[in-house]
Image (cartoon, rainbow, N blue to C red):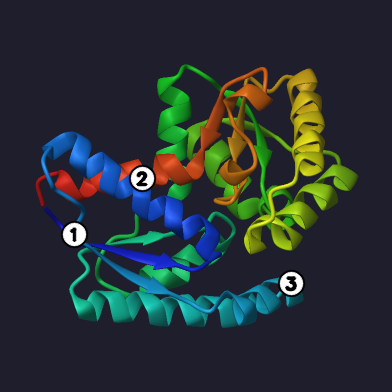
């Protein structure tokens, strides 16, 4: 079993499901009392969140690159960045180490394509929805068309993530907002919805949408477990 290095705390609310999903996948494969071999580096999210909001992505990249180097030095053989939005700085993280990074967009795209789908609605932080780093990777590298909410709905989705989900608040009124936003994406032609924020599965489940949901947290974590169990 290869050692997984997790960069978590982004926020820690969604790092907990990562740990659970990875260990559940390993136990399902190996049985008994088996669990994952992993190392967790959990960052302080407050300064990184401020850097994101200020557009200081180089500073955020520097912090995560340092975490990646620490995990590599501790014995991690591959990295998992437990966040969607901060994959914006994934190239800097990859450049900081000699071990591979399992990219959340790539493993999610593989699941979408296995399902035979080509057009998705993307939900996440405003950064993920409006900036090209996520959408263009889906479109250009994987041939998946991406629909995003109207600007006002992007702001609503973004606020709910940072003001509520990242601090453990799960409100039914916010679930209703997301249901409405998802319905609008389906009306535009979305065949499925990608929960492109690792906290969104805390709020939204399959019964909240009329099309399939792709939970990036669960997908990424399962892929990490499969990588760990695969031959080196």
Could you tell me residue 226's position as x and y percent?
23, 42
Q: Residue drawn 67% across and 72% down?
A: 52
- Of mark 3 and mark 2, the one earlier in the sequence is 2
Q: Is residue 58 visible?
A: no
SS state under label 2: helix
Q: Is residue 89 visible?
A: yes
In the image, taking residue 220 as reference, residue 98 lies left or right, namely: left
> How far is the residue under mark 3 from the one under mark 2?
29 Å
Could you tell me residue 211's position as x and y percent?
63, 19
Above or below, 7 against 140 in this view is: below
Q: Are marks 3 and 2 in contact (CB under 8 Å)?
A: no
In the image, taking residue 24 as reference, residue 168 lies left or right, namely: right
Q: Residue drawn 82% across and 41% down?
A: 173
Q: Residue drawn 63% across and 82% down?
A: 47
SS state under label 1: loop
Above or below, 7 against 82 in this view is: below
Which of discs 3 and 1 lies nearer the camera? The answer is 1
- Residue assigned mark 2: 21
- Residue assigned mark 3: 53
> How far is the residue under mark 1 from the one under mark 2?
13 Å
SS state under label 3: helix
Q: Residue drawn 74% across and 72% down?
A: 53
**Residue projecting furthest to the right:** 152
- Of mark 3 and mark 1, the one earlier in the sequence is 1
- Of mark 1 and mark 2, the one earlier in the sequence is 2
> How far is the residue under mark 3 from the one under mark 1?
34 Å
Above or below, 218 against 41 in this view is: above
Q: Mark 1: give few (<14), some (14-19) or many (20+) Cα within 10 Å.
A: some
- Residue assigned mark 1: 37
């Amino acid at each position: 079993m290869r050692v997984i290095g997790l960069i978590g705390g982004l926020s820690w609310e969604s790092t907990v499901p990562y740990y659970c999903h990875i260990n559940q996948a390993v136990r399902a494969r190996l049985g008994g009392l088996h669990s994952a071999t992993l190392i967790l580096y959990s960052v302080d999210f407050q300064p990184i969140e401020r850097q994101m909001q200020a557009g200081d992505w180089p500073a955020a990249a520097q912090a995560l690159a340092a975490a990646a180097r620490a995990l590599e030095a501790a014995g991690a053989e591959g990295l998992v960045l437990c966040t969607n939005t901060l994959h914006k700085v994934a190239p800097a993280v990859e450049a900081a180490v000699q071990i591979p990074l399992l990219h959340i967009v790539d493993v999610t795209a593989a699941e979408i394509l296995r399902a035979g789908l080509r057009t998705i609605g993307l939900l996440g932080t405003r950064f993920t929805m409006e900036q090209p780093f996520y959408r263009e990777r889906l479109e250009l590298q994987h041939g998946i068309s991406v629909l995003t909410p109207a600007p006002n709905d992007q702001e609503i989705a973004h606020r709910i993530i940072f003001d509520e989900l990242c601090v453990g608040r799960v409100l039914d009124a916010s679930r209703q907002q997301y249901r409405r936003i998802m319905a609008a994406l389906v009306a535009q032609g979305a065949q499925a919805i990608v929960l492109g924020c690792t906290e969104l599965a805390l709020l939204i489940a399959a019964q909240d949408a009329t099309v399939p949901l792709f939970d990036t947290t669960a997908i990424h974590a399962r892929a990490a477990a499969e990588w760990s169990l695969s031959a080196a």
